[in-house]
Image: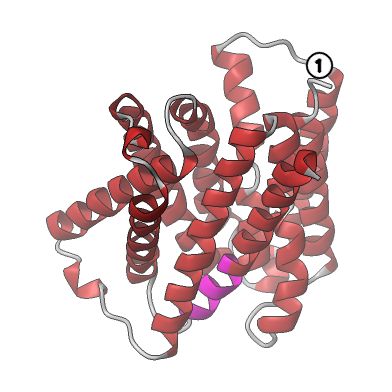
Amino acid sequence: MVTLTPHLMALAGAICSALATILIRQGLQSGNFYVGFWINVVVGGVGLWGAVFVLEPAEAYRAAAIPWFVLSGVIGTAGGRLLRFVSIEKVGAPVAASITNLNPFIATGLAILVLGERVTLPILVGTFVIVVGTTLLSLSGRRVGFRPLDLSYAFLSASCFGAVAIIRKLGLSQASPLFGSAVNITTALVAFTAFLLASGKRHTLVCQGRGLVYFVGAGIAENLSVFLVLVALSLGEVSVVTPLAGTAPLFVLPFTSLFLKGVEKLTWRIVVGAALIVLGVVLLTVRAH
């Protein structure tokens, strides 16, 4: 049973991520992505630091790990997660979840270009499957109601998450997932708040009623997802945890049918495209085996 712990945590993280995607889409009907993201990181900061103070011993606060999690907070959380909010608003929950899920594909490409890693058959097959799936999603835009160019927000989000994967792993080698998550989310909150103040967008931080409830719920689910995946990574192998955590788009599809009727339109291109992208990511992440 112990050996299944990282598997179950990774799957639980995927389900929480899918639920967060649906709640964000609901919240965006009455709010904007600025306030949605800000509430998301505030909820994460309060919850994670509360857990750190209650559950973590003082020796778990490792100063050496802070720079890694600060950097991951700026790139992955402030950049990647904000762009995820924008992409959900622009192209809808199922498509945004699928494209954002390409972050292992981005990480693999960077490893080949920057680190000189070898191109293998699983990488080539996985890349081809991902390209086909992405093409189907882009073709669905005419029927669902978005421009292919709008997919760029989701691709940029995936790029941020892909680039930050190695940084987080380095941080986890020196500190616990809980402490790392708290530093990560706090950095994102400070960076994004500074951006809003500097750009004169304080007026966007207005939300009430159902929108507020949805965004708070999304914040709980989103940050719980990140924490569960970090714990799974600290307990298991990346090649096992990443594919399981990457199944989130498959959970988004039934959640969309259940909770977003009349808001999102599911087509066969979206369903097949999402499934192909998940399959392609699995092929990439298990290439070492």
The residue located at (48%, 67%) in the rendering is 220
What residue span does the magenta drawing correspond to? 20-28
Q: For this view, does 123 lie left or right of residue 43? A: right
Of residue 271 and residue 11, the one placed in the foreground of this image is: 11
Residue at which label 1 appears: 120
The residue located at (23%, 51%) in the rendering is 190
Q: Residues within 10 Å of mark 1 (few under 14, many from 20)?
A: few
In the image, is residue 127 above or below residue 151?
A: above
- Locate residue 80, reporting x and y percent: 45, 47
Residue extending farthest bottom: 209
- Locate residue 211, reporting x and y percent: 42, 83
The residue located at (50%, 70%) in the rendering is 218
- Locate residue 206, reporting x and y percent: 27, 79
Tell me the element at label 1: loop
**Amino acid at circle 1:** Thr
Q: Is residue 47 visible?
A: yes
Q: For this view, does 121 lie left or right of residue 211? A: right
